[in-house]
Amino acid sequence: DAIIVSERLFREDVYTSITINEYTVQCVRTRNGDEEITRDIPNVSESAKRYLDEDGIIMVGAEVKEGDILVGKISPKGQVDLSAEEKLLQAIFGEKTKNIRESSLKVPNGGEGTVAAVRRFNIAKNDELDDDVIELVKVYIAQKRKIQIGDKVAGRHGNKGIVSKIVPIEDMPHLEDGT
């Protein structure tokens, strides 16, 4: 069944929902060395790291959008033949950039919102982790979502339908007394 709703519901956040999504990143031991969570990420601008704390983890309360870095992470890479660009970067930035690559956790498409919480687990605190995992970071992002056309709504008595139109307040039916 089609459901028509008033624009008032949209404006006054009557049918607005909040969804919390969890994003996880792990630092593991690899044969080339250990992965590391850090703010010092090669070839990443300061503006891209603006919401990261000194450890490289997003701050609670930050407004993030698609592509923003949530957790800065670097991974060791094996010795391979370097391309011309990598040789140039190695010559400019020195030894550190040749052995590591950026593998940060970023906000996926459609994941924008506000960082609600960050949880950090590591071996030093005796947290229970998998064998190869050194550290685990979970970032929780809250998304505020207003009702829109195509949403499915249901009542507690089995009546349900799809929002097919959002109508301006003046076009909604009303009683003679204005209610």
Image (tube, helix red, strand yellow):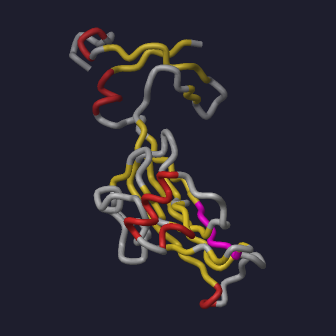
Is 143 left or right of 167, judged from the image as shown? right
Residue at image position (59%, 62%) is 24
Q: Is residue 62 above or below residue 133?
A: above
Q: Indicate the position of residue 174 as horizontal and vertical percent values.
A: 29, 13
Q: Main secondary structure of the magenta part?
A: strand
Q: Quadrant of residue 158?
A: top right
Q: Is residue 94 above or below residue 65?
A: below
Residue at image position (66%, 61%) is 80
Is 14 left or right of 130, judged from the image as shown? left
In the image, 9 versus 101, the foreground residue is 101
Q: Is residue 110 above or below residue 84?
A: above
Residue range in magenta is: 24-29
Q: Indicate the position of residue 162 as horizontal and vertical percent values.
A: 55, 19
Q: Indicate the position of residue 134 as horizontal and vertical percent values.
A: 65, 79
In the image, 146 versus 170, the foreground residue is 146
In the image, 78 versus 179, the foreground residue is 78
Residue 13 counted in the magenta span:
no
In the image, 40 versus 144, the foreground residue is 40
Q: Quadrant of residue 132?
A: bottom right
Q: Indicate the position of residue 62 as horizontal and vertical percent values.
A: 34, 59
> Which quadrant would the N terminus be assigned to in this image?
top right
> Which quadrant would the C terminus be assigned to in this image?
top left
